[in-house]
């Protein structure tokens, strides 16, 4: 940790340590505040937002800017999505066929609506259409990464000098909205329609993220945990090799996406007897995998939220806040009146609805955290944890790479 010219740099090891502390604080707050539990607000969201506010107050009082080294956070993201791939079963992939197609088509359609909403609100304030795109899929569905990639060219080609500031602020505020909307929407749908998981014992079966109370009481053996780590590392090695192979062909994908696919392939195509012959008990849908997934996702999201620089939102003009409010309303209406009915008005559809806000306003990890909080409370939904990351972690980035230039060229 180094303080120089009002900038406090927190190196990676300490950043992870603070992230774990944030996770514990969020857990304690959720235990104490019943409303947070009732609304299924993820624990890392509770703690992360609290600490981001504290860091903002520190900046306001002393001018000290806290900046975290987040390389370890990105490793945790790879760990998490690898566990999702390892847990995927061919039967669930096949069963998720129609819901997957519905979610994919609806999400792409929503991306067009999101950009049109941003452009329309920008026009009401006499702003260029490019500002609406910045406040649309570039910053919301695309997140901080897409914003950082596109903002310089938009600033240069369309004369939006503060495109980066607008995009980063929109992505930050969208992440907050996404983190807060998923749980309440799922609770409303589950309560109103009296939904329950499809399997009677779903509350006690292995979930993708986290352990039930029964599993926590039973405990996890050290060899089971070590076997889970080994399975994850094997999948990451294959995923990294696949990522490099695709990169040589000019097809660029985030590392966590190829690790997700590697986990799916290794769990479904390699015979179990081969693993046993090598002395390895391949871990899939085991408490150890679920525990590691919970640790990785929770710490990743806690670090992401605690590192947000909330004071950058203060300088946003009224048109940008109006765009974000309109985008939030659009996401809620589409989730309740289009997505949920099209997916069958069942429990899986309610869990997907919790994740849809994370997909459309925040990020894939936010979507997964929303769904994890809901399933911890109401029961497992394997199908939701298959189709949501496949759509949001793979197809959305490809679609957005085509949709952003289309709107910029068509409306600017």
Image (tube, rainbow, N blue to C red):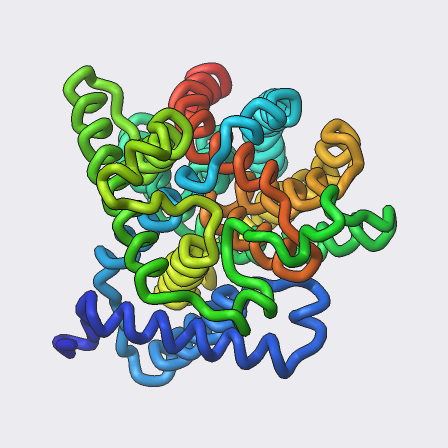
| Residue shown at 56% from the left, 54% from the top | 372
Picture coordinates of residue 211, whole percent (x, y): 53, 62
Task: Depth check: give the residue in front, 129 or 298.
Answer: 298
Along the horizontal axis of the image, is 342 left or right of 393?
A: right
**Vertical relation: 51 (above or below) 91:** below
Is residue 72 something one can see in this rendering? yes
Image location of residue 25, percent across then percent down: 47, 79
**Quadrant of the image containing the N terminus:** bottom left
Q: Residue 167 at what x, y percent from top left?
A: 41, 44
* Residue 312 versus residue 266 in the image, above or below: below
Picture layout, residue 396 above or below residue 187: above
Q: Could you say where residue 44 lies in the image, as x and y percent from the top left?
A: 48, 66
Query: Residue 339 lies in what quarter of the image?
Result: top right
Residue at screen point 46% across, 28% down:
396
Residue 396 relative to residue 103: left or right: left
The residue depicted at 52 percent of the width and 75 percent of the height is 27
In this figure, what is the number of numbered marks? 0
**Along the viewing direction, whichever of 239 and 63 lies nearer the viewer:** 239
Q: Is residue 145 above or below residue 15?
A: above
Q: Which image quarter holds the C terminus?
A: top left
């Amino acid at each position: 940790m180094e303080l120089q010219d009002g900038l406090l740099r927190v190196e990676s090891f300490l950043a992870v340590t603070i992230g774990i502390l944030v996770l514990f604080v969020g857990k304690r707050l959720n235990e104490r505040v019943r409303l947070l539990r009732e609304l299924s607000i993820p624990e890392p969201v509770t703690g992360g937002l609290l600490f981001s506010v504290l860091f903002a107050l520190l900046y306001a009082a002393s001018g000290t800017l806290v900046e975290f080294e987040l390389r370890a956070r990105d490793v945790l993201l790879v760990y998490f999505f690898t566990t999702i791939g390892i847990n995927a079963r061919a039967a669930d992939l096949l069963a998720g066929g129609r819901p997957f197609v519905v979610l994919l088509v609806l999400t792409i359609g929503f991306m067009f609506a999101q950009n049109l909403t941003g452009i329309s609100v920008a026009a009401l304030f006499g702003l260029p259409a490019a500002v609406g795109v910045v406040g649309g899929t570039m910053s919301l569905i695309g997140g901080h990464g897409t914003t950082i990639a596109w903002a310089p060219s938009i600033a240069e080609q369309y004369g939006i000098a503060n495109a980066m500031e607008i995009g980063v602020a929109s992505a930050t505020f969208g992440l907050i909205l996404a983190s807060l909307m998923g749980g309440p929407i799922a609770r409303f749908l589950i309560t109103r329609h009296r939904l329950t998981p499809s399997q009677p014992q779903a509350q006690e079966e292995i979930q993708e993220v986290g352990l039930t109370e029964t599993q926590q009481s039973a405990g996890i053996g050290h060899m089971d945990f070590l076997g889970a780590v080994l399975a994850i590392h094997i999948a990451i090695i294959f995923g990294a090799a696949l990522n490099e192979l695709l990169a040589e062909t000019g097809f660029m994908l985030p590392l966590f996406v190829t690790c997700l696919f590697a986990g799916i392939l290794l769990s479904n195509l390699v015979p179990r007897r081969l693993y046993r012959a090598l002395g390895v008990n391949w871990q899939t849908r085991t408490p150890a995998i679920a525990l590691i997934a919970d640790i990785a996702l929770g710490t990743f999201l806690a670090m992401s939220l605690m590192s947000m620089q909330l004071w950058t939102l203060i300088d946003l003009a009224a048109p940008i806040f109006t765009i974000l409010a309109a985008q939030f309303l659009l996401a809620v209406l589409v989730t309740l009146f289009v997505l949920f009915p099209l997916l069958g008005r069942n429990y899986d559809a309610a869990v997907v609805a919790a994740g849809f806000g994370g997909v459309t306003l925040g990020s894939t990890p936010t979507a997964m955290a929303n769904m994890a909080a809901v399933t911890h409370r109401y029961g497992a939904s394997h199908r939701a944890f298959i189709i949501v990351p496949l759509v949001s972690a793979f197809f959305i980035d490809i679609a957005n790479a085509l949709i952003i230039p289309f709107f910029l060229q068509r409306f600017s």
